[in-house]
Image: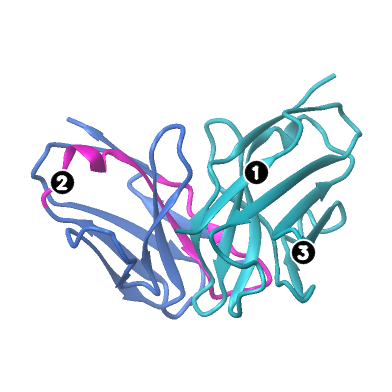
Chain colours: A cyan, B blue
C-alpha cells in the first residue's frame, strides 16, 4: 500500500521560508499518470490546493500562491518537496502531501499531515 | 476561478439514516467532481471520483451523482464511523483545483 510521509520544521518565523519534504514508500514517484501534490488546511478551516508536480518537472500551482511556491521532485530519493517563501501567520496550517491522479485529478493517497505554525 | 459551494454546512443525523449532501460549482465541471471524507485529526480520504465512481475499498453505502454544476453525495444507512466532514473537489480546471467548504455530519 502506497504511503506518504511529510517531514520538516513545525515552527517557522514570519518572512522566512517554509520547507517540507514528502517521502513516498511502497510505490514509485516516477509512475505514469500520477502527479504529486501539496494541500493545506488552516486550523478549523477547509482545504486549499497549493500545487502539484509530475516527476518530469511539469507543474501546476495555485495562482494565489504561485509567486511564493516551489515544488520539486527527487526521483532518486522518491521524495518531493515544498518551499513557501515569505510566510506570514496566515500560512499556519496542516500541510498534506498527496498523490494526484491525472486521469481524474483526484487525490487518492494522502500523508498524515504536518502542522506548521508561523510565529516569532 | 471555479467556486464550489456545499449544502448544508452541517447536519445532524442518526445511525441508519440516509444522508444527502449537495455540492454546486459556479460553472460546469462536467463529471470532474470528487468527494472526500475527513475525520478529526486525520487526512481526507477519497470516497468518490469522477462524480459517481466509488474508490476502491469504500463501502457501497456511499454513492455520488450529478454532472455539470450540481452534484450529490448520498450515504445510505449511516454508520457510526461515517460521522465526519465531507468535502467536494472540482478537478475540471487544472489551473486551480478547488474544494468546497465542507459539510459536517454529526450525531443527532
Pick whichever, A83 or B36, lies toward us: A83
**B26 sits to left or right of A32:** left
Q: Secondary structure at mark 3?
A: loop
The residue at the point 16 percent across, 43 percent down is: B79
Residue placed under numbered mark 1 in the picture? A6
Q: Residue B87, labelled with which disc?
A: none
Q: Secondary structure at mark 1?
A: strand
Q: Secondary structure at mark 2?
A: loop
* Among the 4 quarters of the image, the one containing residue A31: bottom right
The residue at the point 42 percent across, 65 percent down is: B34
Whether residue B47 is situated above or below residue B11 in the rendered picture: below
> Most extreme residue toward the left, as rendered?
B16
Whether residue A34 is situated above or below residue B104 in the rendered picture: below
Residue placed under numbered mark 2 in the picture? B78
Query: Is B103 part of what is drawn in magenta?
Result: no
Pick whichever, B91 or B60, lies toward us: B60
Same chain shared by disc 3 and disc 1: yes
Identify the chain of the residue marked 3, using the numbered disc in the image: A
Residue range of the region highlighted in magenta in the rendering: B77-102
User: Can you give x and y, in whole percent of width and height, for residue B53 in the image?
Assistant: 32, 73
* Among the 4 quarters of the image, the one containing residue B52: bottom left
The residue at the point 64 percent across, 73 percent down is: B94
**B26 sits to left or right of B107:** right
The residue at the point 51 percent across, 73 percent down is: B27
Alpha carbon distance from label 2 to label 3: 45 Å
Amino acid at each position: 500500500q502506497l504511503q506518504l510521509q511529510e517531514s520538516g520544521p513545525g515552527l517557522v518565523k514570519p518572512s522566512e521560508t517554509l520547507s517540507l519534504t514528502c517521502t513516498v514508500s511502497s510505490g514509485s514517484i516516477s509512475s505514469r499518470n500520477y502527479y504529486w501534490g501539496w494541500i493545506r488546511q488552516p486550523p478549523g478551516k477547509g482545504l486549499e490546493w497549493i500545487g502539484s508536480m509530475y516527476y518530469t518537472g511539469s507543474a501546476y500551482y495555485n495562482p494565489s500562491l504561485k509567486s511564493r511556491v516551489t515544488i520539486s521532485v527527487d526521483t532518486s530519493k522518491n521524495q518531493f518537496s515544498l518551499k513557501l517563501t515569505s510566510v506570514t501567520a496566515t500560512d499556519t496550517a496542516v500541510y498534506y502531501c498527496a498523490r494526484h491522479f491525472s486521469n481524474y485529478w483526484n487525490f487518492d493517497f494522502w500523508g498524515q499531515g504536518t502542522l506548521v505554525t508561523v510565529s516569532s | 476561478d471555479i467556486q464550489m459551494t456545499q449544502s448544508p454546512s452541517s447536519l445532524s443525523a442518526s445511525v441508519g439514516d440516509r444522508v444527502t449532501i449537495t455540492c454546486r460549482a459556479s460553472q460546469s465541471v462536467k463529471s470532474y467532481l470528487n468527494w472526500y471524507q475527513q475525520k478529526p485529526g486525520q487526512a481526507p480520504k477519497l470516497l468518490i471520483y469522477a462524480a459517481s465512481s466509488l474508490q476502491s475499498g469504500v463501502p457501497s453505502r456511499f454513492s455520488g451523482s450529478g454532472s455539470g454544476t450540481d452534484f450529490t453525495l448520498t450515504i445510505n444507512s449511516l454508520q457510526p464511523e461515517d460521522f465526519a466532514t465531507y468535502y467536494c473537489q472540482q478537478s475540471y480546471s487544472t489551473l486551480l483545483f478547488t474544494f468546497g467548504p465542507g459539510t459536517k455530519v454529526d450525531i443527532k
